[in-house]
Amino acid sequence: MIALDLPRERKLALGEKPLIMGILNLTSDSFFPQSRIPDMTLLVERAKKMIEEGADILDVGAESTRPGADPVPLEEEIGRLIPALKALRNALPEAVISVDTYKSTVGEAALEVGADIINDISGLSFDANMANMVASFGVPIIIMHIKGTPKDMQKDPRYDDVIREIKDFLKEKMELAVEHGIRRDQIILDPGLGFGKTDEHNLLILKHIQEFRSLERPILIGHSRKGTIYKVLRRKGPEEALYGTLAISAYCALNNIEILRVHDVLENRHIVDMISAIQRV
């Protein structure tokens, strides 16, 4: 059993079964339209529902990082995010809240108003001050692999050995984090499904997910309703990718993945809890 240290002397236990991280998008252009949240009332309602349905973590993002997305100006991201975090913390004082940002200034502002975890899709690559900022607060960080930027990452991504290269990237960024004062036991690793990968790359990552265990840190998988799923299943889009998402969640649960980042909390909670019950017998 692993426990991450959170602000206000709280702990987040990992390892018994996958934790469910519910996605809260404060954007108008996220790839799954039904996940977009246009106002604070709906945000708090959806967050409360996710907690009731079994979410262990709420992941809040104010900038879409879908393929082809343009960067959001710093002031705009902060303007969306900070009021939302204040509303969430007021309504759900004990909820574990992660912030999806690669900007240290945004992350700092978020931590100051009650966020608990930084989820950096760039793996400390886009902002040279991110590692120092996270270290100064002592909070957990999710380091994700990406090839390129959201704007160009899906333009013919290529690897000689996708598993080895992702592992090398994550190891390098983990060492960078530690050099800047982030505790190794506060790091979570995410191989970054869909972030500069083809469908085959994504499937290979999942097939060989146990190879990432050599990095000796908890693993997060963010697969929910992504393009690889509806392409493999020959569906029209993310709206028809729930069952494929649940299949991957089941696979990850059987592989003891620590965190699953998903849009549909209740359905994924049921998958994880059922598999866990079988494993405990």
Image: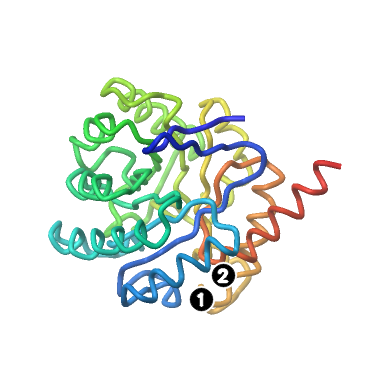
- Marks 1 and 2: CB-CB under 8 Å? yes
Q: Nearer the viewer, residue 87 or 74?
A: 87
Q: Is residue 17 above or below residue 266?
A: above
Whichever of labels 1 and 2 marks the residue nearer the N terminus, that label is: 2
List x then y, in percent, for residue 238. 51, 73
Q: How many marks?
A: 2
- Local crowd size for mark 2, using a 10 Å CA cut-off: few (<14), some (14–19), many (≥20): many
Task: Say whether residue 119 is left or right of residue 256.
Answer: left
Q: Is residue 237 above or below residue 267?
A: below
List x then y, in percent, for residue 176. 30, 25
Query: Which quarter shows the N terminus?
Result: top right
Q: Is residue 256 above or below residue 265?
A: above
Residue named by callout 1: 237
List x then y, in percent, for residue 205. 55, 44
Task: Say whether residue 76 is left or right of residue 156.
Answer: left
| Amino acid carrying mark 2 in the image | Tyr
Residue named by callout 2: 230
Give how far apart the Cα atoms at labels 1 and 2 are.
6 Å
> For numbered disc 1, what is the local secondary structure?
loop
Q: Is residue 185 above or below residue 146?
A: above
List x then y, in percent, for residue 103. 22, 47
> For numbered disc 2, what is the local secondary structure?
helix
| Amino acid carrying mark 1 in the image | Gly
Task: Say whether residue 267 is left or right of residue 98.
Answer: right
Please name the residue shown 51% across and 65% down the image.
Answer: 263
Query: Which quarter shows the C terminus?
Result: top right
Residue 257, labelled with which disc? none
Q: Nearer the viewer, residue 71 or 270?
A: 270
